[in-house]
Every structure is written in C-alpha cells, then in structure tokens.
Image: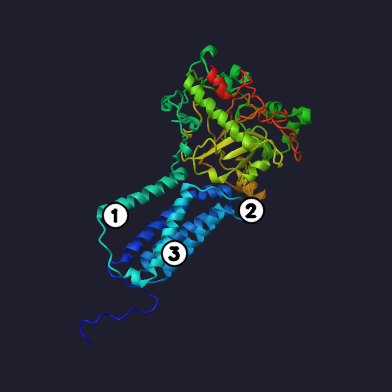
C-alpha cells in the first residue's frame, strides 16, 4: 500500500471533519443559536410560571435541553446523535410555538406574535437547518472559507445584542414602547410638534410632589371627579403593595366598601370578616388598598401636557369600549386571574402582552365587575415586568399614574386564591402555591363612565367597587351598577366632554 494512501473511512455513525471544515463553522453557529434560544426561555420562565405552572416548567425544560444539546455538540464532535437530537428538539419547539400563535394550545386562545418568541424560534430554526446540514458528510467535510475575525466579532456582538434586547423586559426591566407609543409621542399621536420629552412630571421617580396650584392655573381638572379635585393634594404616591400595615381599621374599610342597598351593611360585613381570618388578614395587610383616601395628584399647568394626557385617556376609554364584557375579553385572549374583589374588580390578563412594556392600546389586564360572561368592564390595568425596587418610568403623561406590586399571592390553577398574607401552609391547604411576583408592577386606569374613582383616575383602589354577595351575578347594568354605557359622559369635574376636549378647551 502506498504511504500516501488516504485514511480509511470512519466507522458508521461518525462524521469526521478537518480542522478548518464547514462542519466547524456549522457547529459554532448551531451551538450559539441553541444557547441564545435557551437564554430567552430561561428569562421568560418566571413569567410563565405566574401564568401556569405547566408553562413555566415547559420553558425551563426546553432551556436546559437546548443548553444540553449545545454541550453535547461541543463534547462529542464525531458523533451524529447530538445533531439528530438538536434538530428534533428545536423542530418540536418551533411546531409548538406555531400552534400557540395560530390555532392556540389546548385550553387557550392563539397568542400574538412578539419579538422575543420570534427571535427564539428563528434561532431554533438556525439550529435545525445547521444540524441537518451537519448530517451530510459531503457538506461538512468541505474546507471552510477563511472568515475575517472582525466580521466574526461583529456577528457575535449582533447575536448577543439581539438576545439581550429580547430578555431585557424580563430581566432588566427596560421596555420599548410598541408601535412608536412612547413619552416622546404620547398615545401615538402622529404629527405632534411638541417636544414631549421636556414635559413636566414625566419621571415617575420624581415623588417629591409639587406645590399647591390654584385651580385657575391648572388645565387638568377635567381628568378627575370634582370630589377628587377638592380633596387631593400634591405629594408622594400612596403605597399599594402587599405587606405591612394599613392606615385604617376593618370597620372603616367596611363603611367604604359595604353595599347596604344590596343587602351588605357595614356591621354585617365586619361580623362576617371576623370569622374569615385569611380574608380579614388580606384586607388589613394592604391586599386591596393601604389607605381609604384620595391618591396624591401633582397638578399639570402646561397645555401641551394636558392635551397629551387627554389624548391618552381618550384612547384608554376607546380600548375599554372594545371589551365591554368578560365574553369579549375572553374572545380576545384574556383569561381570568382573579375573582371579583372590592376596590380592584376582577382581573383578566392577556399573557401575550407581558413582553412589550407599556403599550397603551394593549393593556395586559382588563377589569370587570364580575366573572360572568355578561359582566361589565370597569377599567384597565397595565402590568410591567421590571426587576428592582424602582417603579417603571413609562406610562401616562405626568407623574400621577403609579405602579404597585402583589408579592407572594396564592395561586390555584392560575387564579388568585388568596392574598400575599397567606402562609405556604394555608396556600397548600387551598390547593394552591405561592407565587413570587416581585418583578411585576401593576397600575390602574378607571376610565369607564359610572366607575370613575373619587380617589383618582389612577388610584390603586376604587371606592365605587363595592363588596358583592358571594355567588351573586354582580351588577345587572353597566357602569358599576349605575346603568351608564361606555358612550355616556364621564363624571369628571367639568362633565359632558371627553378628556381631550376638556384639555383642548382649557
């Protein structure tokens, strides 16, 4: 045999590659794509645990399998099985994602497409295609063209940047404003010549308050009820996060939220709650509200600020009008996450909107006066995922809309079963589990006629939402039982006009 004879072909099941083959490049790309997709799945697993335990575990398992396949590709360089496994796993994940965005998974409606899930699926597609190519020896054995280190570095940085942009809403808490809706262009108002970045009170972190301003100098009186405008003072926001103590007694709370006209007198409500330690503890630990007074309000005096806020509130009212009943919300992909609770209503969440920060036309939650298909909308709620103790800076114009947290709620089948005051043992006894929720920030907007809040349009709780008799269907008419429709005038101080009309006229 010649000394220069080529080596024998490898045994079946291996795909040897020269040191600088196409296979090396494919391997590096597939490993990077698998790790990138895994990072996205790790980042969003906590949010999916909040939604449903099964979804959270799915995201975690997929992430670990993708990390494992990347390790296997790096460790067993001559074996075929890591390529087969990588292609099969990522193809299956892509198929599940496509079903969730088109037909919907069993028991849920189709979810909207988003940048993070689209990027993860794109990376998974790269992993599938690369793995299939690697299984063809005639391709991977070819000599690889020399790649400029600069180009390689640029491509690597681009990959890191895309993944970072995708997971930052979940980990870092920085959110873009979808559809161009940001504080630079409030409510997406195209063609606004004002420099919105310079508007007063834009920073939610500015909680020092503002001096009292004479009503004649203000342009914002039409955004709240006369009762609120008479009582509210500038200052720092009230705490509405669970935990700690409240500044009222159970008897004082009952006077506000009892409903004697419908058979729930204050005295009877107190007597009932004294026999319900978990519910009583939830009220007195701030689960529903920390105070029974109007929220602070820092006045707006610049017409451009009021006009911009007026546009936003008009749009928020139009959003509420799109989902007049629970049936409409469920048809649009929202599902129940709380039962009806006095002061804060029943919450229905669209988990597909959790990734996009504050987008005015896509509230993460809709609020209803009950949980029947015919129950009526009473307000909106925005839910932003952000790490740390500083509340999100994005939202409505001014610094009067504030966010709060509910940490450690007891969830049963994705619905809040009891408040943060519940112990692990109590929650388990109810068949639930304690959720974290430390990264979730919630705000309210009471923009429905008949359901205006005398504690402020952005108040953490609304005194118009009274206690309901358990098992009763709730109000039979809209507007928190007032019979007002979504086209009725809002009971703001000047009355009869929409927020934008009021702001423009002042």
Choose between 84 and 441: the one closer to the eye.
Answer: 84
> Residue 143, image x and y in percent?
27, 67
Q: Circle 1 sits in a helix, a strand or a loop, which is it?
A: helix
State yes or no: discs 2 and 1 in contact (Cβ < 8 Å): no
Separation of marks 3 and 1 at Cα, in angstroms: 23 Å
User: Which residue does the image show at 56% across and 53% down from the upper left?
Assistant: 102
Q: Circle 3 sits in a helix, a strand or a loop, which is it?
A: helix
Q: Quadrant of residue 457?
A: top right
Of the 4 image quadrants, the one containing the N terminus is: bottom left
> Residue 140, image x and y in percent?
33, 68
Vertical comparison of 392 with 107: above or below:
above
Going from N to C along the chain, the mark reached first, 3 or 1, is 3
Residue position for label 2: 107
Separation of marks 2 and 1 at Cα, in angstroms: 44 Å
Residue position for label 1: 152
Q: Which colour scheme is used?
A: rainbow
Name the residue at the right extreme.
263
Going from N to C along the chain, the mark reached first, 2 or 3, is 3
Vertical comparison of 36 with 24: above or below:
above
Residue position for label 3: 86
Is residue 386 visible to us here?
yes
**Relative horizontal placement of residue 337, taking residue 391 as reference (left or right):** right
> Residue 259, image x and y in percent?
74, 29
């Amino acid at each position: 045999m010649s000394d220069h004879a080529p080596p024998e072909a490898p045994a079946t099941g291996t795909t040897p590659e020269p040191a600088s083959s196409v296979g090396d490049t494919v391997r590096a790309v597939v490993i990077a794509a698998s790790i990138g997709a895994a990072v996205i799945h790790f980042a969003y697993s906590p949010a999916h645990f909040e939604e449903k335990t099964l979804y959270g575990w799915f995201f975690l398992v997929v992430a670990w399998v993708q990390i494992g396949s990347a390790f296997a590709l790096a460790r067993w360089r001559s074996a075929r099985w890591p390529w087969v496994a990588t292609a099969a796993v990522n193809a299956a994940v892509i198929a599940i994602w496509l079903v969730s965005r088109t037909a919907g998974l069993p028991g849920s409606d189709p979810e909207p497409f988003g940048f993070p899930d689209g990027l993860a699926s794109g990376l998974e597609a790269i992993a599938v295609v690369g793995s299939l190519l690697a299984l063809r020896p005639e391709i991977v054995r070819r000599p690889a063209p020399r790649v400029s280190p600069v180009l390689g570095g640029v491509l690597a940085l681009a990959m890191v940047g895309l993944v970072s942009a995708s997971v930052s809403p979940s980990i870092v808490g920085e959110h873009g404003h979808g559809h161009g809706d940001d504080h630079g262009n409030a409510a997406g108002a195209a063609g606004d010549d004002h420099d919105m970045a310079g508007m007063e009170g834009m920073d939610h972190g500015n909680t020092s308050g503002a001096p009292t301003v004479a009503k004649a100098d203000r342009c914002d009186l039409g955004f709240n009820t006369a009762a609120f405008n008479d009582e509210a003072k500038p200052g720092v926001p009230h705490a509405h996060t669970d935990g700690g103590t409240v500044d009222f007694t159970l008897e004082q709370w009952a006077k506000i939220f009892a409903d004697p006209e419908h058979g729930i007198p204050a005295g009877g409500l107190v007597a009932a709650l004294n026999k319900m330690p978990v519910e009583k503890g939830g009220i007195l630990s701030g689960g529903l509200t920390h105070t029974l007074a109007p929220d602070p309000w820092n006045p707006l005096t610049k017409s451009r600020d009021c006009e911009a806020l007026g546009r936003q509130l008009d749009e928020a009212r139009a959003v509420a009008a799109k989902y007049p009943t629970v049936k409409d919300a469920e048809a649009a992909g929202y599902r129940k996450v709380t039962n009806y609770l006095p002061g804060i209503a029943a919450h229905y969440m669209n988990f597909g909107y959790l990734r996009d920060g504050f987008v005015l036309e896509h509230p993460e939650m809709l609020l209803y006066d009950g949980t029947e298909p015919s129950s009526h909308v009473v307000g909106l709620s925005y839910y932003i995922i952000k790490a740390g103790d500083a509340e999100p800076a994005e939202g409505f114009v001014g610094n009067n809309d504030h966010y709060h947290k509910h940490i450690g709620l007891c969830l049963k089948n994705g619905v809040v079963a009891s408040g943060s005051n519940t112990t692990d043992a109590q929650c388990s006894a109810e068949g639930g589990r304690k959720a974290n929720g430390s990264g979730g920030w919630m705000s309210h907007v009471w923009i429905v006629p008949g359901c205006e809040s005398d504690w402020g349009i952005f108040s953490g709780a609304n005194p118009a939402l009274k206690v309901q008799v358990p098992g009763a269907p709730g109000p039979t008419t809209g507007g928190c039982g007032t019979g007002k429709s979504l086209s009725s005038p809002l009971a703001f101080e000047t009355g009869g006009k929409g927020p934008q009309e009021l702001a423009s006229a002042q």
